[in-house]
Amino acid sequence: MRPARAAGLALIFLAGTARAVDFPAPFNTQAGEPMPAVEALKTVKAPPGFHVTLFAAEPDVQQPIALATDARGRLWVAENYTYGEAKVGFDLTQRDRIVILEDTDHDGHFDKRTVFCDQVQRLTSVEVGFGGVWALCAPQLLFFPDKNGDDIPDGKPVVVLDGFDFGPVRHNIANGLRWGPDGWLYGRHGIQATSHVGPPGTPDAKRIAMNCAIWRYHPTRKIFEVVASGTTNSWGMDWDKFGEGFFVNTVIGHLWHLIPGAHYQRMYGEDLTPHTYGLIQQHADHLHWTASGKWTESRDGKNGADELGGGHAHEGCLIYQGGNWPAEYRDQLFTVNFWGRRVNMENLERDGSGYVAKHGADFLTVGDPWFRGTELLAAADGGVFMADWSDTGECHENDGVHRTSGRIYQITHGPADIIPPDLAKLTNAELVQLQLSPNDWLVRQSRRILQERAAAGGKMKDAAPALLTMLAKETDVPHQLRALWALHAIGSAGDALLRKTLAHSDEHLRIWAIRFLTEDTRALKTVPAEFFRLAQNDPSPAVRLALVSALQRFPAEARADLARPMLQHAEDAADHNLPLLLWQGIEPLVGVDLGTGVALFEAARIPLVREFIARRLAEDLENSPAGFARLLARATTSTAGQGELVRGTLAATRGWRQARVPPGWSGFSRVVAQHPDLVTRRQAKELDLLFGDGRALAELRAAAADPKVDSENRRRAIQSLLDSRAENLAPLLKEIAANDTTLASAALGGLLQLGDPAAPGLAVGKYKWLGIEQRPPLLNALANRPTSAKALLDAVAQGVIAAADVTPFHARQISGFNDAALTKQLGAVWGDLRPVDPNKRAVIAKFRADLSPEILARADLSHGRQLF
């Protein structure tokens, strides 16, 4: 590999620079050096017949965090030198760059290297299309125009989106740009920060909040949306031949089916959507590490992880659909096992409405102890690129970063395919014909080019008829799907065609017709009549899943009629996905329209949905008891759903100390006392106690400690224990604060309330790890006592807590202690307080008089939440 010239340095946007200057020399903070790349290559073990070549290595490529390809088959590499270290965070003395590597003689090694851009920071991924290059650099998604394709940006980048938070987060910020079969640009987001995303200038109220999510952006309609939420830190995603998305993850499960509108299990924290209740578990029937121990103890093959697949962390996801590898590998899913230094293979099988991954034999292993695979990507010639970060330790970089190493391997089987030199030079007719290619790389690239030409105003008269013929005449379903996707990409899949496709004999065509008909939520007012027919009669649970996903895209007032027939499919009660996704679709109705909630309870033949409806109504029984009373009246005269009503009510009130008897409870209690299920009778008696003398403190302590109880009820249990002055409470609160990020603020606030001597130090130490919504109440608690207030001011002085986080309210609390030393320290680290304006004092006094404890006791808190 020979050094190549850099492209003309791009005009870009680092503050204070108009043109690129010399690229800072990368430096290492991690000790040691990896084995030479040619030696590392010898440690790669692949199945017989496969050839692994060293496509590129340091110094030609370093820190390869992500890969993409363009219409010429060239490899685009995102090199991240600013990657955050545990001790120092992001190193912004460094810059990141986008490099193009090209193999002109097709020998498995690059022979031309071009630097496209070297002025960005926090670069996590790159993608090519629509006359330029997309780069995800938190807090922004950037687009570098390059209309003439000379590999020199036409000017400064366009900020497409902003608001991707990074804060203290280093290793799981937004990442993963990739074009989907629907023409949207997809991305991923980690769990440790909550972003509020929108085009530049979007008001806060209109920004979209997300964490640990899959999101997408439409390149021509300029729409951003969250596709699905949950998991931990996804770093790999791909689509199968039917256009179904899959992504990989760490710790809590390694493989997930991308279902639009889904809410998945989280490693920790609360789903941003209230009243979620149940979260979808992973779509695999196995782990690659033992579940009997801690996931941190599965590294380097320990505790049987080597035999199970290598460990808990996965990066890069590829469903092989090229034309080069043997047939037995086609349609299998591959992912790099980070700690196992191998590539796992997963066999995707249909399971109810979705899929389940079965454990396949490991595909490839790497003996180099520095191997840290970050990406798998289909190559133009039917082979596969595999990126190696080349480092030791873990993604948290607790031991520093080795910036001067990195490798990219290419994996082929026999002679590689020969591809056209530049797909962008082909005619529309030639691009249409490539939709039938056995090499899906050609299919995807040609579809994107057709989409770009249509978006630019190009005439599609020679493309649309050929694609319509392909859709009608082809008998292979993936070929028909490719035709439909391409028609949609060029704007020729109108409502008439899509409504006709809803009656197609194959479920996958019906699924995509549903998705395309509901893609633009701005146009959705009423539900198409054909949807009701499918909801009632379609034999495919996968089609029902698509309908349930689409349910969330309609306005809330339009959902009930479509939800009702889907709730009556009793055969879906045990499905992995449908009950939970159904609940997500109807929850807004249940919480707002009490009559609709009760009617849906009556219609439902899916027990979990009935339980969640009861739970939602029971949550408001103290402030808005009418809906729960109507449900009780209905359940008193009908045995169907009585057990679910009891379970839902119990879940809704798990952390409550005592509650008023709801109207109608006495009659229902007498009826359910005769219920044939013993557990239901016992649970009803527990509710009798709640509505009578109240729960014992031991039950509240158990609820507070139980991670299976929802967070709001655990908070309520903690407060009830504090109000009751429960004995020996501090150890429980310390355990919660240490192990549960979601409840840490409540637990630490409780410790501060108890006056525990360790509480101020624990609160300050945990502060930076809390979500932004948990910090204000903890600051309130810290500022509420002289001892903890001093710890707060010390933390501000040391930079542990930002001075901007301390509000005038907190400052007045601290000043109100009349402690000269505290007041002086407050002035030194925060500033001096100004006297309160007399008019403001009068307004405050009026609110205090108007909102007396007696008035607040009768307040409608639910209505207050709606107003807020």
Image (cartoon, rainbow, N blue to C red):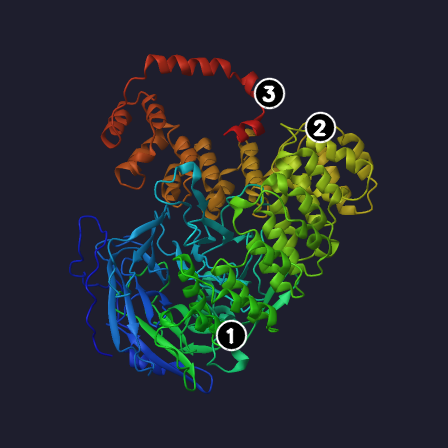
Above or below for 861 versus 524: above
Above or below for 773 versus 725: below
Between the residue at mark 2 and the residue at mark 1, the CA separation in whole angstroms equals: 67 Å
Decide if residue 515 is on the left or right side of residue 161.
Answer: right
- Secondary element type, mark 1: helix
Tell me, yes or no, if residue 488 can be seen here.
Answer: yes
Where's residue 335, x and y in %?
47, 69
- Secondary element type, mark 2: loop
Tell me, yes or no, whether the two marked residues, 2 and 3, touch with CB atoms within 8 Å: no
Mark 2 or 1, closer to the camera: 1
Between the residue at mark 2 and the residue at mark 3, the CA separation in whole angstroms equals: 17 Å
Decide if residue 333 is on the left or right side of residue 795.
Answer: right
Q: Earlier in the sequence, mark 3 or mark 1?
A: 1
Tell me, yes or no, if residue 251 can be seen here.
Answer: no
Q: Earlier in the sequence, mark 2 or mark 1?
A: 1
Mark 3 or 1, closer to the camera: 1
Q: Which residue is the site of mark 2?
A: 661
Above or below for 21 versus 364: above
Decide if residue 152 is on the left or right side of residue 266.
Answer: left
Q: Number of labelled discs?
A: 3
Instruction: Sort mark 2 into few (<14), some (14-19) or many (20+) by Cα contacts within 10 Å.
Output: some
- Residue occupying image coordinates x 41% and y 14%: 843
Q: Which residue is the site of mark 1?
A: 436
